[in-house]
């Protein structure tokens, strides 16, 4: 569904006030004093206009949000959380997730299910901790990359492995990208190993990420080493962010608010200056669009009219204040105000 809309007196990314004319779900003109008889008008009253947030990494199949409070008893290790989750979601039968949530090789039949899901049209091949979970990195990565080759799909490998173990898995991933010519087709999520303090370990990995156009997803985790966002972006690496789990069997935290996620990324990277906080905002907006190859993203004429109107003087002000007085526009239709859905979009 698309709509026409005239947004008056908005400040795109904190710039001068202007109007945005939307026709059939796309921004067609951006200038002060626009006129569009018969088109609904949304007066932004000098508030910020921000491009739509891009949630580039979340496990909506696991969320318990809206299902009442669930007590959390999962252990500290990834495998503890996996086993806890499997015990609690037994009645659910999820067929269309091409991600080995509980491991690929250690769960017989998972590879075949992923193959079927991809044949049904699932867009991305997933992988998970080749060393730490499956304990057979060569076989795990060979299987993941084979699925990618068979179905012509990009890859997203969730790599929680720290330090030298994670670096070893990354090197194996790099080898396969080079051999198969999959430059720009692989995302590594979490990549805790890039947060290691040893620059002699991390810097060569960053150089190869840039060479092979491997994207990185970070949630800005509070309790794990985190990829250095500023260094990655300075190296030309595409960086995105996401909520990961949203109040699920792994953790009671999360609400899906990507403006809050930008704050988490900023805090985790010790971003304090406005230009640095803008990098955290980037991971939740343009960075996500770049990683997910979203065409027509932004606030310029020709872009899809997906945007947010929020109070604030600057982008940094919005990130640190996280106002709930928001107007959400999707393809030209106002779909939410103040956190309340006002319209469903097909």
Image: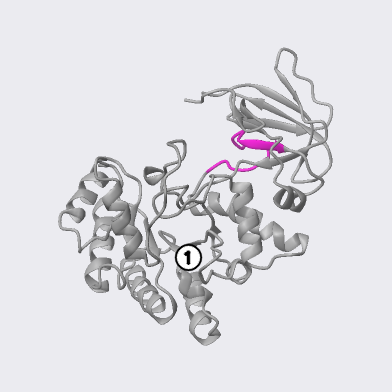
Mark yes or no: residue 169 visible: yes
Image position of 255 with respect to 290: above or below? above
Q: Quadrant of residue 250?
A: bottom left
Q: Residue at x 54, y 49 (%)?
A: 289
**SS category of the residue bearing label 1:** loop
Residue 26 in the image: x percent, y percent? 61, 30
Residues rendered magenta in the picture: 295-309
* Classed neighbour count for the residue bearing mark 1: other residues with Cα under 10 Å, few (<14), some (14–19), many (≥20): some
Image position of 327 with respect to 261: above or below? above
Q: Can you identify the residue that label 1 sits on?
A: 213
Q: Residue at x 61, y 58 (%)?
A: 264
Residue 130 in the image: x percent, y percent? 30, 69
Asked if the magenta segment contains residue 269, the reply would be no
Q: Residue at x 35, y 46 (%)?
A: 123
Residue 146 in the image: x percent, y percent? 24, 60
Mark yes or no: residue 128 visible: no
Residue found farthest to the bottom: 200
Asked if the magenta segment contains residue 302, the reply would be yes
Main SS class of the magenta portion in the image: loop
């Amino acid at each position: 569904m698309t709509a026409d809309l005239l947004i008056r007196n908005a400040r795109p990314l904190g710039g001068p006030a202007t109007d945005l004319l939307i026709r059939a779900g796309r921004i067609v003109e951006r200038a002060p004093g626009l006129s569009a008889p018969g088109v609904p008008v949304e007066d932004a009253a000098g508030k910020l206009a921000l491009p739509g947030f891009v949630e580039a990494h979340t496990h909506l199949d696991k969320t318990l949000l809206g299902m009442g409070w669930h007590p959390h008893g999962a252990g500290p290790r990834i495998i503890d959380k996996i086993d806890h989750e499997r015990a609690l979601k037994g009645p659910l039968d999820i067929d269309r997730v091409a991600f080995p949530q509980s491991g690929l090789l250690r769960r017989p039949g998972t590879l075949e299910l992923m193959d079927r899901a991809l044949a049904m049209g699932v867009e991305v091949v997933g992988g998970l901790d080749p060393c730490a979970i499956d304990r057979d990195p060569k076989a795990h990565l060979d299987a993941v990359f084979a699925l990618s080759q068979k179905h012509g799909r990009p890859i997203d490998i969730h790599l929680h492995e720290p330090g030298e173990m994670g670096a070893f898995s990354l090197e194996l991933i790099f080898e396969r990208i080079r051999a198969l010519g999959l430059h720009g087709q692989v995302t590594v999520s979490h990549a805790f190993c890039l947060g290691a303090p040893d620059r002699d370990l991390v810097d060569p990995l960053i150089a190869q990420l840039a060479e092979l156009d491997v994207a990185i997803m970070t949630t800005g985790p509070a309790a794990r080493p985190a990829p250095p966002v500023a260094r990655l972006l300075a190296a030309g690496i595409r960086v995105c962010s996401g909520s990961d789990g949203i109040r699920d069997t792994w953790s009671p935290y999360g609400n899906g608010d990507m403006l809050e996620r930008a704050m988490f990324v900023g805090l985790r990277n010790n971003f304090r200056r406005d230009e640095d906080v803008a990098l955290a905002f980037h991971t939740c907006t343009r960075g996500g669009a770049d990683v997910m190859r979203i065409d027509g993203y932004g606030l310029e004429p020709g872009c899809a009219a997906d945007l947010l109107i929020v109070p604030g003087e600057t982008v940094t002000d919005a990130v640190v204040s996280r106002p709930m007085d928001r107007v959400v526009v999707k393809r030209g239709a106002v779909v939410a105000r103040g956190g309340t859905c006002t319209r469903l979009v097909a």
